[in-house]
Image (cartoon, helix red, strand yellow):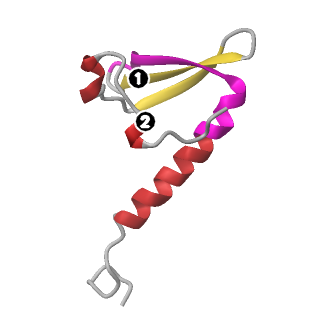
Amino acid sequence: MRERVETSDVRFADEALRTGAFANAFRLTPDNDGECFLDFCVYSPSEDCACIVARVRVRTDFVPVIIHRLGEGLQDLTTIHQPPRGTGDGDN
């Protein structure tokens, strides 16, 4: 199973996917035969309801790879968005 896909390797199956769909929640739902769904949702606290905006079926043995890549991506985002030391953010 391939863990990493570089940007140059990626195409959109449908051009409408290019802009993506907004989501503020997700869930992992087991299916059958070693597969599960990743549902990306828009959750409304006022309605206490979520609407699925994208669903992807993956093999359950791929989930740890997803978790690993999310961790790497979050680490990269944290590094990018850290304010420089000594800029009045309490790190002086």
The residue lying furthest to the right in this view is 33
Q: Position of residue 41 (x, y in %)?
A: 41, 23
Per the rendering, the mark at residue 9 is 2
Q: Is residue 39 one of those drawn in magenta?
A: no
Give the amino acid at mark 1. Cys
Local packing at callout 2 (Cα closer than 10 Å; few below 14, some 14-19, many 20+) is few
Q: Is residue 65 one of those drawn in magenta?
A: yes
Question: In the depicted view, which residue is nearer to us: 39 or 10?
Answer: 10
Per the rendering, the mark at residue 41 is 1
Q: Position of residue 19 (x, y in %)?
A: 24, 28
Q: CA distance from mark 1 to mark 2?
A: 27 Å
Q: Residue 27 vs residue 64: left or right? A: left
Name the element at disc 1. Answer: strand
Local packing at callout 1 (Cα closer than 10 Å; few below 14, some 14-19, many 20+) is many
Which residues make up the magenta segment? 47-66
Question: In the depicted view, which residue is nearer to us: 26 or 16?
Answer: 16
On-image quarter of the N terminus? top right
Q: Residue at x 32, y 24 (%)?
A: 46
Q: Residue 87 vs residue 92: left or right? A: left
Q: Residue at x 42, y 66 (%)?
A: 79
Q: Position of residue 69 (x, y in %)?
A: 56, 45
Q: Residue at x 35, y 82 (%)?
A: 90
Give the amino acid at mark 2. Asp
Which corner quadrant of the image does residue 91 belong to?
A: bottom left
